[in-house]
Image (tube, rainbow, N blue to C red):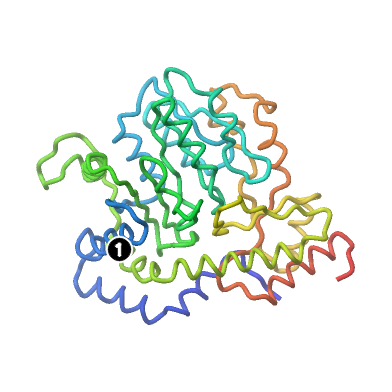
């Protein structure tokens, strides 16, 4: 049996007529840049999520950079974030001229450890960027409480957590502003690069919109220098179709994750993911910790099971951040986990038969009777 890591074609087949009609409509209306499809998606996403304002941009990386620039973060400033995330979270901080300050992760939930944040705050700290990694909500209420006491911005990186909840409230709505990626493999994915930013702050929204549109809110009237970062009409139309299904797809992912957890629970060599109390984990990634991780990964691939590692080396120890002079012992949990974590196939269309096959092969590798 072949089990892909993600099957985007299976998802397309389920909504083919709606997607095809959406694409045809954009072509018919030649609404490729800006226009009604982008406006519709921004409006629909804001309403469904509970934001007053939502801005479509070119990708999730741009989203973070635009937020930082709009908040005035730059040379000499520091921004706190987590050691285990995709580099977009940190590199955008550096691109403003500020310095990323890394914090280790929680042992159980893989998100930034709030208990370690305050020791990293200095007079130069301007913001905290918690990442709701793998679809698991960070301990966001505690993070916001810390930020408010120190007069810091909270920028929620929701690239992997569309419509995940903590205490029945969507992640992204706790802090000052939230960023999203609609990369094709995300729970809510476009058919190319796409991103977005949500906020309830009108002044911040207008500043971000201006910066993302060459520094102009009105064409040819440039108040500042900006960048060109636009969500294109084709992607917006596709996302508008998919938006209707996202919560249903998230529920299916959660159901698949719980089946994995049940089937894997007796394998001593595997640590299954925990769900934070009062949280709805949307399982963008189904992450386990595995003994003999690399050998298991090779064995599963040999048996037509696609797996991945998110992420093989924590950011502070990457060559890109050698200038910060971090030592491995600075991040003991992140360092320990980077050689153990393994992402198993996860998507809404994943069948019970496929999940059982994956687990059967894991048991076979460790010598359990299937």
Image location of residue 263, percent across then percent down: 76, 66
In the shown orientation, is residue 226 left or right of residue 168? left
Check disc 1 and report the residue beneath it.
Answer: 44
Circle 1 — which element? helix
**Of residues 122 and 210, the one drawn nearer to the viewer in this rendering:** 122
Residue at x-position 46% and y-position 66%: 247
Q: Quadrant of residue 176?
A: top left
Residue 179 vs 121, above or below: the answer is below
Residue at x-position 25% and y-position 44%: 205
Residue 226 vs 57, above or below: the answer is above
Residue 241 vs 90, above or below: the answer is below
The quadrant in which the C terminus is found is bottom right
Image location of residue 27, percent across then percent down: 24, 72
Image location of residue 87, percent across then percent down: 51, 40
In the shown orientation, is residue 141 left or right of residue 361? left
Q: Quadrant of residue 48?
A: bottom left
**Of residues 30 and 108, the one drawn nearer to the viewer in this rendering:** 108
């Amino acid at each position: 049996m072949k089990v892909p890591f993600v099957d985007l074609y299976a998802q397309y087949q389920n909504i083919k007529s709606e997607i095809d009609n959406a694409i045809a409509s954009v072509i018919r209306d030649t609404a490729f840049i800006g226009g009604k499809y982008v406006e519709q998606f921004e409006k629909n996403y804001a309403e469904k999520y509970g934001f007053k304002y939502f801005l479509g941009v070119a990708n999730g990386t741009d989203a973070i950079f635009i937020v930082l620039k709009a908040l005035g973060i730059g040379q000499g400033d520091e921004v706190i974030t987590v050691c285990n995330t995709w580099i977009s979270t940190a590199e955008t901080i550096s691109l403003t001229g500020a310095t990323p300050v890394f914090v280790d992760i929680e042992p159980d939930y893989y998100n930034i450890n709030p208990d370690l944040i305050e020791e990293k705050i200095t007079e130069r700290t301007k913001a905290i960027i918690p990442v709701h990694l793998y679809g698991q909500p960070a301990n966001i209420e505690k993070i916001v409480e810390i930020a408010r006491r120190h007069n810091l911005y909270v920028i929620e990186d929701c690239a992997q957590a569309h419509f995940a909840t903590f205490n029945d409230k969507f992640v992204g709505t706790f802090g000052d502003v939230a960023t999203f990626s609609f990369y094709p493999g995300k729970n809510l994915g476009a058919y190319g690069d796409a991103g977005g930013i949500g906020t309830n702050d009108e002044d911040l929204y207008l500043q971000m919109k201006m910066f993302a549109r060459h520094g102009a809110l009105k064409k040819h009237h440039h108040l500042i220098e900006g960048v060109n970062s636009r969500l294109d009409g084709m992607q917006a139309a596709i996302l508008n179709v998919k938006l209707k299904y996202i919560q249903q797809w998230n529920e299916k992912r959660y159901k698949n994750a719980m089946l994995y957890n049940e089937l894997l629970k007796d394998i001593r060599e595997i640590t299954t993911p925990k769900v934070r109390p009062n949280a709805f984990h949307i399982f963008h990634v189904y992450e386990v910790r595995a003994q003999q991780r690399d050998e298991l990964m090779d064995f599963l691939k040999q048996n037509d099971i696609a797996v991945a590692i998110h992420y093989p080396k924590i950011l502070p120890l990457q060559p890109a951040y050698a200038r910060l002079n971090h030592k491995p012992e600075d991040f003991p949990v992140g360092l320990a986990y980077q050689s153990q974590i393994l992402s198993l196939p996860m998507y809404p269309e994943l069948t019970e038969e496929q999940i059982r096959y994956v687990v059967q092969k894991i048991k076979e590798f460790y010598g359990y009777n299937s």
